[in-house]
Amino acid sequence: MSSAAHPASPPLTERQEARRRRILHASAQLASRGGFDAVQMREVAEAAGVALGTLYRYFPSKVHLLVATMQDQLQHMHTTLRKRPPAGETPAERVAETLMRAFRALQREPHLADAMVRALTFADRSVSPEVDTVSRLTTAIILDAMGLDGQPTPAQLSAVRVIEHTWHSALITWLSGRASIAQVKIDIETVCRLIDLTAPDAA
């Protein structure tokens, strides 16, 4: 189903890319003010200055739109982190620092964070390409922080997947009020130690 709904498409023109960026900006602004429920497709279209039909051609649903918004936010984070990389001595320390910096960025916009995480939770198979892109970006951010010389080992990639799951779960429990920021930090630092355990010379 998803392959039929997402055929290989040509790159966006400059004008189309500018329109897409306006849409994502409008989505983020509305979500920042009122969370998931505040992102109504008609209001997004009005704020972005596009026709409602045009919006649906770019994003078939609100979930598609908000997952794409999370992708956009992660790309910005990745760029920022590359400009100012973490300073920890070990890969585990650097990844923990990186994820806490990303977490604090989301913490500054709790309504936006809640909207994006809820969209990921609601996403069905039709949103798989967008969800996969979010996962690949998160993986790239973690691998950058690890500072590997060469390709990661299968054990390291497994550790990265567990770290991603923990980070996502930590976001959900914090947003629902079931975990403090201090607890999130402890959980992230704990799971990041898996990286040092999977280093080729760890044995």
Image (cartoon, rainbow, N blue to C red):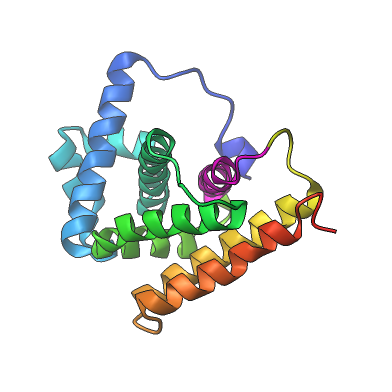
Indicate left or right for 89 with 98 as reference.
right
The residue under the point 21% across, 34% down is 51
Residue 42 can be seen in this image: no
Indicate left or right for 51 with 58 as reference.
left
Q: Say which quadrant the C terminus sits in.
A: bottom right
Question: Whole-percent x and y of residue 43?
Answer: 17, 49
Q: Say which quadrant the N terminus sits in.
A: top right
Between 151 and 31, which is closer to the camera in this rendering? 151
Question: Whole-percent x and y of residue 69?
Answer: 35, 46
Point out the residue furthest to the bottom here.
178
Is residue 133 part of the magenta span, yes or no? yes
- Looking at the image, residue 107 lies above or below residue 26: below
Point out the residue furthest to the front here.
89
Between 90 and 172, which is closer to the camera in this rendering? 90
Magenta segment's dominant SS is helix
The residue under the point 46% across, 18% down is 11
Residue 114 can be seen in this image: yes
- Looking at the image, residue 176 lies above or below residue 171: below
Question: Whole-percent x and y of residue 131?
Answer: 53, 49
Question: Whole-percent x and y of residue 127?
Answer: 52, 49
Q: What stretch is highlighted in magenta?
A: 127-148
- Looking at the image, residue 70 lies above or below residue 108: above
Indicate left or right for 85 with 45 as reference.
right
